[in-house]
Image (cartoon, grey):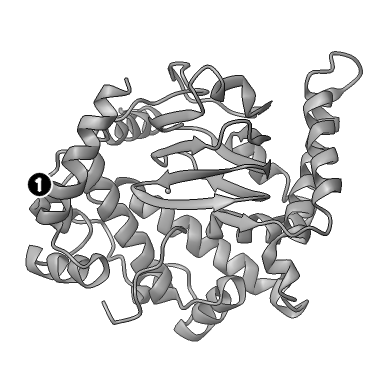
C-alpha cells in the first residue's frame, strides 16, 4: 500500500520542480527536506551586503518570512508582482512564493523566517494574535506609522538578541516575544492608524471562517495549473461555500470583515496571481495553465487574464516572462495585487 504521507511529499516535490527557480532553506543555502518548528532571525546586513543589496529570485518551500524595514526601502516581487516601498514597513512572504528583493544600500531591518507550524502554534491560545496574522498574511505589505515604530524596533532587536542567547530557555522566550512582535506590527500598521474599529478586528466566527477559506484556497492553488489537469473542485465561491459548510452571505461577510473585499475578489486575485506565477516561472503551456486553473476552455482564461493584466497570456509571457527568465538565469506570493473589479 502506498504511504499517503510519502505520496503527498512526492506530489509536493513534483509541483515545486515545475517552478524553475532555486529553492532555499535560507537564501543561498540548499533546501533538502521539509522542516518543522523552525524560527530564525537575522539583520538585513548578513545576506544583503555580500549580495550588493540584491536578493535574486528564489523560494522557501517550508518557510514564511517577515522582512521588517525600519529605515531605507526596497523594490520587491511576489510571484511576478512588483512593488516599491520606502520607510518603515513589514512585508510578509508566504512559503513557496517566488520572490526577490532589491534594497536601498544600508537599509536597516530584519528578516524573520518561520515554518508554518511555528506560526500556527502562536494562535492556539491567543485570538488577537490570530487576527493580526490573518491581516498580515493576506495584505502581504503593511506600512508602519511613526507611533510605536521605535518601540517595535527595540522589540525586534530583543528577539534577535534572545535568539542568539544560549542560556535558560531562549526558544520559549523567543516564541512569546515574537507573538508580541506580531501584535506590535498590527498596532503600528497603517491599518490600525486608519482607525479600524474593534468589531472588524473580532476574533470570533467570522475570523475562523475566513481563515479556513484562505487556507482552502491556498491549498487548492498550490497544485492548480501545474499538472495541466483540472482541479478536483471548482475554484469558485459557490464551491468554497459548499466545502466550508457555510452560506455566500457569511463567507462574504467574513472576507469583508477581514479585508474589506468580497470572496469573489479574493478568489480572482488568487487565480490571477497563480496564473502570473506559472507564466513567469514555468514552461506549462497556456492551455495547460487554463485547464489547471479550472477554465473549461483556454479562451475563457485568456479573456480573464487580458481583462486584469491588459494583455494576453501569450504576449505577457513573450514580453515579460522570457526576458525575466534570462535575467534570473544570469543571477544563478492569498494576497498581492488586486485584479480590477470588472467581473470574471
- The location of residue 242, given as percent across then percent down, is 40, 73
Name the residue: 58% across, 48% down: 91
Is 122 placed above or below 171 here?
below
What secondary structure is found at the residue carrying circle 1?
loop
In this picture, residue 325 sits left or right of residue 333: left
Q: Name the residue nearer the viewer: 339 or 144.
A: 144
Q: Residue at x 22, y 50 (%)?
A: 225
Could you say which is closer to the camera, residue 180 or residue 110? 110
Can see residue 214?
yes
Q: Residue at x 58, y 34 (%)?
A: 115
The N terminus, quarter of image: top left
Quarter of the figure with the C terminus = bottom left
Q: Nearer the viewer, residue 34 or 305?
A: 305
Q: Position of residue 265 (x, y in %)?
A: 40, 74
For disc 1, the neighbor class at 10 Å (few under 14, some 14 to 19, many from 20) is: some
Locate residue 312, reporting x and y percent: 13, 62
Place of residue 332 in the rendered image (x, y in percent of width and height, measured from the top left): 32, 20
Q: Residue at label 1?
A: 285
Query: Which residue occupies the foreground of this view, 113 or 229?
Result: 113
Q: Residue furthest bottom?
A: 249
The residue located at (62%, 34%) in the rendering is 114
Amino acid at each position: 500500500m502506498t504511504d499517503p504521507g510519502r505520496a503527498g511529499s512526492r506530489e509536493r516535490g513534483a509541483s515545486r520542480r515545475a517552478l524553475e527557480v532555486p529553492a532555499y532553506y535560507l537564501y543561498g543555502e540548499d533546501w533538502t527536506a521539509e522542516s518543522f518548528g523552525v524560527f530564525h532571525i537575522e539583520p538585513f546586513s548578513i545576506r544583503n551586503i555580500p549580495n550588493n543589496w540584491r536578493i535574486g529570485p528564489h523560494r522557501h518551500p517550508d518557510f514564511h518570512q517577515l522582512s521588517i524595514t525600519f529605515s531605507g526601502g526596497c523594490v520587491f516581487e511576489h510571484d511576478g508582482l512588483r512593488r516599491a516601498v520606502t520607510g518603515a514597513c513589514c512585508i510578509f512572504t508566504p512559503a513557496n512564493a517566488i520572490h526577490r528583493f532589491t534594497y536601498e544600500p544600508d537599509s536597516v531591518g530584519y528578516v524573520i523566517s518561520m515554518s508554518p507550524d511555528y506560526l500556527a502554534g502562536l494562535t492556539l491560545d491567543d485570538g488577537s494574535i490570530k487576527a493580526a496574522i490573518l491581516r498580515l498574511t493576506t495584505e502581504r505589505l503593511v506600512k508602519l506609522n511613526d507611533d510605536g515604530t521605535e518601540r517595535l524596533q527595540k522589540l525586534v532587536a530583543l528577539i534577535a538578541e534572545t535568539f542568539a542567547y544560549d542560556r535558560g530557555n531562549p526558544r520559549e522566550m523567543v516564541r512569546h516575544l515574537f507573538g508580541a512582535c506580531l501584535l506590535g506590527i498590527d498596532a503600528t500598521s497603517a491599518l490600525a492608524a486608519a482607525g479600524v474599529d474593534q468589531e472588524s478586528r473580532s476574533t470570533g466566527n467570522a475570523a475562523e471562517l475566513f481563515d479556513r477559506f484562505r487556507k482552502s484556497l491556498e491549498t487548492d492553488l498550490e497544485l492548480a495549473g501545474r499538472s495541466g489537469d483540472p482541479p478536483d473542485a471548482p475554484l469558485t465561491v459557490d464551491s468554497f461555500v459548499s466545502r466550508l459548510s457555510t452560506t455566500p452571505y457569511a463567507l462574504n461577510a467574513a472576507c469583508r470583515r477581514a479585508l474589506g473585499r468580497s470572496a469573489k475578489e479574493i478568489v480572482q486575485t488568487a487565480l490571477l496571481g497563480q496564473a502570473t506565477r506559472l507564466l513567469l516561472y514555468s514552461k506549462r503551456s497556456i492551455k495547460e495553465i487554463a485547464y489547471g486553473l479550472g477554465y473549461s476552455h483556454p479562451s475563457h482564461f485568456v479573456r480573464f487574464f487580458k481583462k486584469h493584466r491588459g494583455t494576453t497570456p501569450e504576449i505577457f509571457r513573450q514580453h515579460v516572462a522570457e526576458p525575466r527568465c534570462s535575467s534570473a538565469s544570469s543571477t544563478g506570493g492569498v494576497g498581492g495585487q488586486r485584479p480590477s473589479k470588472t467581473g470574471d
